[in-house]
Image (tube, rainbow, N blue to C red):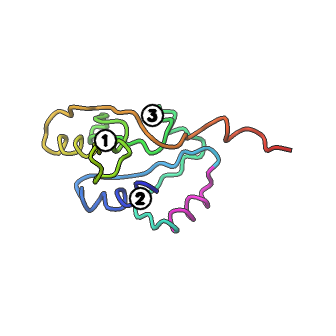
Amino acid sequence: MRYDDYLNRFVERHPELGLVAVASRYGETADQIRTIAAERKLAFPILHDPPGAVARQWYTQQTPRAFLIDRDRKLLYRGAIDNFKFPEDSDYQAYLEPAIASFLAGQPIARQETASFGCAIQSVYYILPNPL
């Protein structure tokens, strides 16, 4: 929920880029994703990846995790959107937006990877049996 507004406005800020969210969390169903997207008014495409294949292929363990990929499918940036602070906080640091700005300006991306903050895509807690 922390990034709903950011992602909803992404295409408005960057019409020259594409955005797709990948829902790889263990146990999430397509109906759950549709319901959440409607409740939260999510306006961006969401790919349902029930077996977590995309997450494993991209070595992703937390959500959200952003990937900036060029038209040749070269990975340019991987990691957090920001340092999980609000823009008005004095110690706020954006990670994805500077990478996008460098990419669009045709310049090298200074920080190509950052640690992600967020929920686990798969955890032992998701697969433990229910208590008796």
Residue 58 is tagged as 3
Q: Which residue corresponds to the image point at 45% horizontal and 68% vertical from the top-left?
A: 41
Q: Residues within 10 Å of mark 3 (few under 14, many from 20)?
A: few
Camera-near label (2 vs 3) is 2
Is 13 on the left-hand or right-hand side of 57?
A: left
Label disc, if present, on residue 68 of the rendered structure: 1
Element on which disc 2 rests = helix
Measure the C-alpha gap from mark 2 to mark 1. Answer: 18 Å
Which numbered dot is residue 4? 2
Q: Secondary structure at mark 1?
A: strand
Dots 2, 3 in contact, CB < 8 A: no
Secondary element at image label 3: loop
Is residue 48 placed above or below 129 in the rendered structure?
A: below
Percent position of residue 117, x then y: 44, 40
Q: Quadrant of residue 125?
A: top right
Q: Main secondary structure of the magenta part?
A: helix
As rendered, which of 20 and 4 lies closer to the eye?
4
Label whose residue precedes the other's in the sequence (2 or 3): 2
Residue 64 picture location, percent across and down: 44, 45
